Amino acid sequence: MKNKKIDWLITLVPLGIILLLCILFFTYPNASSDIIGKIRYFFGDTFGVYYLIIGLGIFIVSMYIAFSKYGKIVLGKKSEKPKYSFFTWGSMMFTCGLAADIIFYSFAEWLLYANEPYTASLGDIYEWSSVFPLFHWSFIPWAMYLVLAVAFGYMLHVKKKEKQKYSEACRPILGKWTDKFPGRIIDLLAVFALLAGTATTFSVATPLMAEIVKVLFNVTISRTTITIIILLITCFVYTYSLLHGLKGMSVLAKACIYLFFGSLIYVLIFGGQAKFIIENGFGSLGKMVQNFIGLSTYSDPLRTSGFPQTWTIYYWAYWMVWCVAAPFFIGNISKGRTVKQTILGGYIFGVGSTIISFIVLGNHSLGLQASGSVDFITMYNTTGDLYKMIIEMINTIPLSNIFKFVILITMIAFYATSFDSIAYTASCYSYKKLSHDEKPHKSMQLMWCILLILLPIALVFAESSMANLQSVSIIAAFPIAIVLILIIASFIKDAKSEANKSSE
């Protein structure tokens, strides 16, 4: 690793800013929470339509790119074949994009919507509480990933750029400004968003993993201590996987997928709610597709419920922040595929797997609620502890202790496969120049593996800091969205000549 090749400004400045913010949040928790909360509310309340327009717009653009002349462009040489099989490619793509959050939310998100007055106002609470998870986790989030993935894939494999950065993808429009102040700001913002999003994602699912460990092994140590142990184990797994290259990452991703789908099949067959899962899931999917445009554009102008501000706008902003790492990785592994294959294959595997997860895991407990067998809603309203609530949901599944252990291993695998791809992307980002076929030095990869886990460990000790940092990452989505538009416009402009060749 040559020091002169390392872009220390882009690598260390965002990390320093985030560490400084965390210190401020920890030192002045109440004041910082108040200020950050007001800023976050301002962006969500004032510019909510901005996020909604960009979300729906990117989905429409993804369809246009896939079925237009751009769709025929091969991400690589024209005769080049995909390096990975569809299953391996899909596994790596799916696991890099969602982390273990998908398991946590698949179990419990319907419960949060069921408590919303707005959901009840729409009609059947059981059907609509299943619709919103499908909507907030499927087509628009994956559209953000996939459109950027083909833009980065084109940049890496067709144009063979030596700068693997956000700013480089904007060069067709920014021109000479790419290497000046605007380009540097874009790259600083991208790494900042990557670190903030990475640090906060652990706040969602790791407490559930800690709770599973406490229940399974009857340990008396605190949830915080268990969480740190889990984080260290996860770090070891994804570091080992990453240092063994893309082959190691692909093996881990496939193992994760086998565990994941195996768990879903088990719940469907042996959980006792197969009929409700299939029928309500099918109905919810239909209702989501039927109302897709309405759900995508609803802004609640009179603020009668605040639902889109609390949920849809929040989710779109959070997906935008996550768009830094996942699309780079997806674009990297999509060499040899056409733009159309990448987008539609991503929808089939990514969206398909996501929807199946929410339908099976969510509707299992929802079916018990609807039949009156278990009142999860009342239990949650009494305790307010969503993690213990999920444990209660898992307890309704046969051989629940074995299932808890499988879920724990699957969640570790999900985190590991997400973070090895993020560490790889961050490593590429740290170089001033890196040819399309050149890999980051293992020492740089190791450094990022350690950095990505240190911040979450530090934040475990201060929940307010975690919440504040999450709000900061949502605020960062505002300028990130502008960058997304620049990248998409740059790709369409730059790929026009290549598209004309491909369509001949």
Image: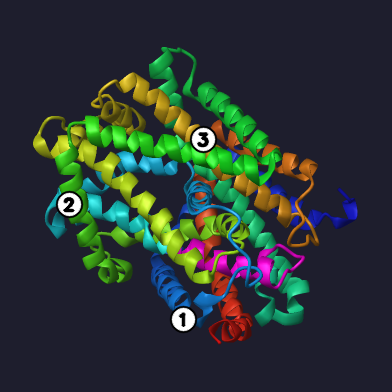
Q: Which residue is at the front of the view, 278 or 317?
A: 278
What segment is highlighted magenta in the picture? 142-166
Q: Which mark is residue 127?
A: 2
Residue drawn 20% across and 40% down?
Answer: 366
What residue does disc 3 label? 413
Kindly state the secondary structure of the residue where label 3 is placed.
helix
Q: Earlier in the sequence, mark 3 or mark 2?
A: 2
Disc 3 from disc 2: Cα separation: 31 Å
Amino acid, disc 2: Glu
Q: Earlier in the sequence, mark 1 or mark 2?
A: 1
Instruction: Characterize the magenta stretch by its predominant secondary structure.
Output: helix
Front disc: 3 or 2: 3
- Contact between marks 1 and 3 (CB within 8 A): the answer is no
Q: Residue 70, how many percent across, how many down?
A: 53, 79
- As for residue 180 lying within the magenta part, the answer is no
Which colour assignment does the render follow? rainbow
Amino acid, disc 3: Ala
Quick one: which residue is furthest to the left in this view?
371
What residue does disc 1 label? 68
Left or right? Give the position of 274 relative to 135: left
Front disc: 1 or 3: 1
Kindly state the secondary structure of the residue where label 1 is placed.
loop
Front disc: 1 or 2: 1
